[in-house]
């Protein structure tokens, strides 16, 4: 594993990198030299089997000084030992990272169709629209006008670290109750106690005390989200902000574009078939409709990029791909010289830009293949949709979407009851018991979904036969 601070410097006279001032760093900001160096590092990250002994040795060498830290170290070692037989070296490139996103985007389309047939209510398939709308409603109901939407979104974002979205929203509700009361100067008997109780309730959903303190700092104007040191937070913030602020026309267009692509992938519609401009935004690339929007590339997206077995779970609960993505592999290399134009751009920031680029390339490929293009032949597929689709899909494969799991269990209970009832009927009639199974659908334990043959043929015809 490369040592820290081993990042090379650009040769003298190389064109400079560009430093954005109003958004996070993206691939197009990198000079040819820096982009080439990052691509070389991607190959190193992909050598998972080769890197694993060094990763384990580093964990073993750690010297935590708390009981909790010792326990976490033991868990990390056990996790690495469990996945060791299943990891492999892969040729990790922007193209392979793109292909992984396309694969899981298409898998999500098929899964959602299968779930719908079974009567599984998975909520809004457009995660950002649903989440952004929820955040906006929470601000209206609990913020009491004390905080702008953007500030509340930022507070929500910093509580996402190591947290589940439902808990993140619950924490924001309680924290806004407490902080709005404080900001508006509420007085009277029991006010201080109520503020304290609301904060305690927020703490129970915020993931960590650090998350809660960071969110409090955001609401009080004491901290913000840095464009370069927190690339995932910045991309997550911009996505939620744009979704929360989107007009009904923009939301409708977003749904129409993704629906068009899904119908083409499922063979329900011909690629390139024209659809009416019902929203007035058919040619728009603004906000959530932007095919080049920055996207939140977290460890689940990194798990897709690293090319390990994302369907594989060992020891009952350890997902092979996610376990390796969570190690950070060679990402913690400090602030090096690959991007001398800004001191806060570490390799982590550059790695996030590479993952965002893979998502943008995947959205372009999907748009081109399904005919979702404008008159200039440019893909109009929103990149946010091509991030949220695979992200939702791999979290469900990894058994980490608690709301989805609960809904699947509900439907499975109905199916089992119906199977039992039908068996009793068949026996009374002297026939054979009803033996249909549902193994083609993914349940709460993550069984692999089988694509219908005609859908697979459609993928191949579109050049997406992954």
Image (cartoon, rainbow, N blue to C red):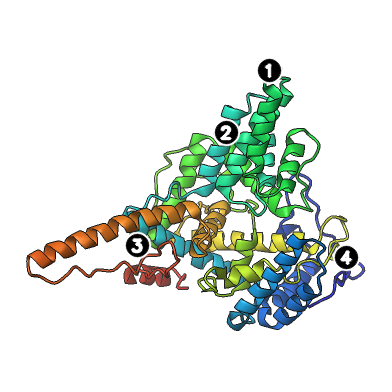
Q: Which residue is at the far left?
A: 429
Is the N terminus in the top left, top right, bottom left or bottom right quadrant?
A: bottom right
Q: Which mark is residue 39?
A: none
Which residue is tagged 2?
138
First-in-chain label (3 vs 4)? 3
Q: Which label's residue is closer to the chain start, 2 or 4?
A: 2
Q: Residue furthest toward the right?
A: 12
Residue tagged 3: 267
Which residue is labeled 1 in the image?
Answer: 189
Q: Is residue 339 left or right of residue 258?
A: right
In the image as oriented, which residue stretches furthest toward the top?
188
Task: Tell me the residue at 52%/48% (across/down).
Answer: 127
Alpha carbon distance from label 2 to label 3: 39 Å
Give how far across and how far down residue 320 sits, in percent. 58, 73
Residue for badge 4 = 337
Q: CA distance from mark 3 to mark 1?
A: 64 Å
Numbered disc 1: secondary structure: loop
Of the residues tagged 2 and 3, which is closer to the observer? 2
Q: Is residue 270 above or below residue 176?
A: below
Q: Nearer the viewer, residue 129 or 419?
A: 419
């Amino acid at each position: 594993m490369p040592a820290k601070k081993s990042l090379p410097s650009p040769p003298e006279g190389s064109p400079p990198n560009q430093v954005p001032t109003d958004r996070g760093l993206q691939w197009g900001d990198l000079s040819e030299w820096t982009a080439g160096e990052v691509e070389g590092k991607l190959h190193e990250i992909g050598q998972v089997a080769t890197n694993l002994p060094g990763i384990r040795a580093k964990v073993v060498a750690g010297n935590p000084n708390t009981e909790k830290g010792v326990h976490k170290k033991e868990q990390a070692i056990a996790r690495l030992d469990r996945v060791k037989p299943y990891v492999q070296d892969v040729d990790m490139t922007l193209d392979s990272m793109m292909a992984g996103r396309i694969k899981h985007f298409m898998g999500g389309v098929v899964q959602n169709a299968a779930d719908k047939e079974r009567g599984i209510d998975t909520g809004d398939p457009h995660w950002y629209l649903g989440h952004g709308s929820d955040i906006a409603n929470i601000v209206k109901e609990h913020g009491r006008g004390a905080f702008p939407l953007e500030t509340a979104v930022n507070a929500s974002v910093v509580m996402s670290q190591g947290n589940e979205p439902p808990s993140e929203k619950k924490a924001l509700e309680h924290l806004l109750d407490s902080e709005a009361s404080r900001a508006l100067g509420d007085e009277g008997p029991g006010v201080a106690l109520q503020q304290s109780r609301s904060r305690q309730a927020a703490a129970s959903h915020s993931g960590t005390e650090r998350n809660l303190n960071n969110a409090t700092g955001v609401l009080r104007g004491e901290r913000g989200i840095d464009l370069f040191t927190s690339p995932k937070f910045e991309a997550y913030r911009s996505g939620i902000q744009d979704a929360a602020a989107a007009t009904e026309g923009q939301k409708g267009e977003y749904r129409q574009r993704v629906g068009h692509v899904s119908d083409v992938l499922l063979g329900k519609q011909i690629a390139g078939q024209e659809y009416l401009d019902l929203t007035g935004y058919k040619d728009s690339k603004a906000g959530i409709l932007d095919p080049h929007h920055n996207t939140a590339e977290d460890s689940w997206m990194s798990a897709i990029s690293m090319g390990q077995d994302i369907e594989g779970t060992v020891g009952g609960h350890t997902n092979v791909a996610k376990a390796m993505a969570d190690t950070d592999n060679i990402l913690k290399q400090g602030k090096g010289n690959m991007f001398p134009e800004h001191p806060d751009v570490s390799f982590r920031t550059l790695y996030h830009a590479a993952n965002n680029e893979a998502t943008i390339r995947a959205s372009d490929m999907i748009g081109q293949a399904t005919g979702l293009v404008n008159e200039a032949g440019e893909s109009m597929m929103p990149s946010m949709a091509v991030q949220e689709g695979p992200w939702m899909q791999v979290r469900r494969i990894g058994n980490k979407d608690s709301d989805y799991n609960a809904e699947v269990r509900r439907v499975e209970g109905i199916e089992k009851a119906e199977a039992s009832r039908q068996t009793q009927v068949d026996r009374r009639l002297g026939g054979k018991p009803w033996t249909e199974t549902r193994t083609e659908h993914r349940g709460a334990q993550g069984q692999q979904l089988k694509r219908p043959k005609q859908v697979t043929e459609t993928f191949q015809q579109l050049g997406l036969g992954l």
